[in-house]
Amino acid sequence: MKLSNSKFKLGTTVVLAYPDDTRLGGYRATLELWKLLAGGDAHSSSTCTASFDALAAEVVQPQDVSPISVAFDRNDAETSKQVSIVLATPISHPELSFCLVSGLPAPERIPELVDSLISLLEEHGVKRIVVPAAANITGVKDRDRVWVEFPASANKHIQSRLTTLACIPSTAQTSDVFLSALSNIAAMSGIGETVLLVHGDKRPAGSAYRQSAVFGEDYADSDDADIVSALVRALAMAVGVDNTASAVPVKAVRERLDVDAASKGLQVFG
């Protein structure tokens, strides 16, 4: 996997968003934080793209997040053959970059995608990855909260910022293949810290059989809004950004190109 612009500079901390397997809670939280930091000004950030050579089983498109949505549009012609990835750095926070994975391949290819992403970030000097997600998790007593996973050697500053969050117990399992693969592969990588912020959730009934859904509208309810807001707050704490009260909700459309594809049962965290 290569960047479309070899001179693009990634910050030492990267927020990684992907189509989490429920209602895109983590993905939408990432977009909200991006909008808070970069706004809609095309000159307030720099962007770059990459791609993973695999048929995308699901595709996500942000609808009102410029210039990220513009960067995604550059790869529209390749959507059916490749999973497109957008990397962006707000000018106001050069130490912080965002990596948005616009789709997922078949479940058996997801670990390969995760490995390629981590290798790319390693190559460009990234020291910390922060991943927000809303996922179907079992083995925890309280699903309605944000859980955190980070290595024992994690920086004390980030640990102190996240003291209000409980650590994911060793008994936890998830049906989100990307999250499970990331938890396990990142632990063996050269990246110093991988922080997972996971809110328990489940995919709305019937959504697996919809070809297209606008998350946050088709499935807008108080639980949905609370999940995204909680993840925005946790994400802001993890990366050291204050004042998230003004974050503006954003839209994202998720289209399932293969509605019969299913994850391979419960996966464990690393």
Image (cartoon, rainbow, N blue to C red):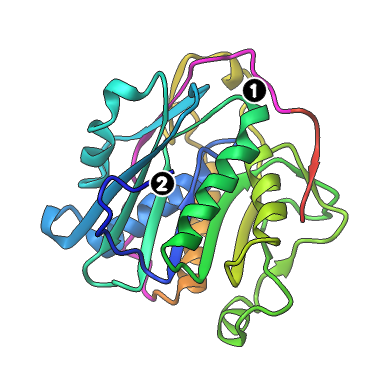
Tag on residue 205? 1
| Side of 61 where 130 appears, left or right | right
Q: CA distance from mark 2 to mark 1?
A: 26 Å
Residue that appears at 73% across and 69% down? 166
Which residue corresponds to the image point at 53% horizontal and 54% vertical from the top-left?
119
For the N terminus, the quadrant is top left
Quarter assignment of residue 152: bottom right
**What secondary structure predominates along the stretch shown in magenta?**
loop
Mark 2 or mark 1: which is in front?
A: 2
Check disc 2 and report its element: helix, strand or loop: strand
> Which kind of residue does numbered mark 2 sit on?
Leu
144 sits to left or right of 195: right
Mark 2: few/some/many CA within 10 Å (<14, 14-19, 20+): many
**Residue 226 visible in the current orientation:** no
Q: Is residue 228 above or below residue 238?
A: above
Q: Residue 247, relative to residue 79: is it above or below? A: below
Q: Residue 244's x, y, as percent?
A: 38, 67
The span picked out in magenta is 242-263
Q: Is residue 249 magenta?
A: yes
